[in-house]
Image (cartoon, rainbow, N blue to C red):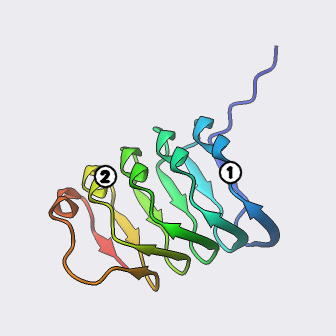
Amino acid sequence: LFQLQLHCINIGRNRNLEGTLSTYIGQMALKTLYIDRTDLYGPIPTEIGQMSRLEILSMHYSDFDGTIPAEIGDCSNLVELHLGWTWVEGSIPSEFGKLTNLRYLDLSFIAVDSGTLPTEFFGMTNLGELD
């Protein structure tokens, strides 16, 4: 039988796309997921942390809200994470310290708690750019 194995989904820059992100997203073996600049809304599903092959997650300029799921820290292959310009809020999860391959992190213009960064944050030794 033919079996489809997607490595990339790019549905970004599509303001006609609205709704919530399914919890089934965690079952996909994607390397890249571009869902930026859409009208997707609601909380980021914790199941996104099950995407162990994910290298690029781009969600910026969308209507996601709630807190940043700590489970994103389980995406150990992440190289780029774009969460800026969304409605997420709260603290930066200490689990981000497990993202040792992360080179780019965009948290621009989101309502993260002020104060100090979690100590674990400094475990991201490859981080070269923080917005």
Front-lying residue, 46 or 52: 46
Q: Which residue lies furthest to the top in this view?
A: 1
In this picture, is 23 found above or below 5?
below
Separation of residues labelled 2 and 1 (CA atoms): 22 Å
Q: Which of marks 2 and 1 is in front?
A: 2
Front-lying residue, 47 or 106: 47
| 10 Å crowding of disc 1: few (<14), some (14-19), many (20+) | few
| 10 Å crowding of disc 2: few (<14), some (14-19), many (20+) | many
- Residue 36, percent from left and from top: 63, 69
Q: Is residue 83 left or right of residue 75?
A: right
- Residue 92, percent from left and from top: 33, 68
Describe the element under mark 2 as helix, strand or loop: loop
Label ID, residue 79 = none
In this picture, is 2 found above or below 27?
above
Q: What's the residue at 56%, 59% (across, down)?
A: 44
Q: In the rendered image, which quarter contains the N terminus?
A: top right
Describe the element under mark 1 as helix, strand or loop: strand
* Number of numbered tags placed on the structure image: 2
Question: At label 2, which amino acid type do we have?
Answer: Leu
CB under 8 Å between callouts 2 and 1?
Answer: no
Q: Which residue lies furthest to the right in this view?
A: 16
Q: What's the residue at 56%, 77% (across, down)?
A: 86
Q: Mark 2 points at which residue?
A: 99
- Residue 42, percent from left and from top: 65, 66
Question: At label 1, which amino acid type do we have?
Answer: Ile
Q: In the rendered image, which quarter contains the C terminus?
A: bottom left
Q: Which of marks 2 and 1 is nearer the N terminus?
A: 1
Q: Name the residue under label 1.
A: 9
Q: What's the residue at 62%, 37% (across, down)?
A: 28
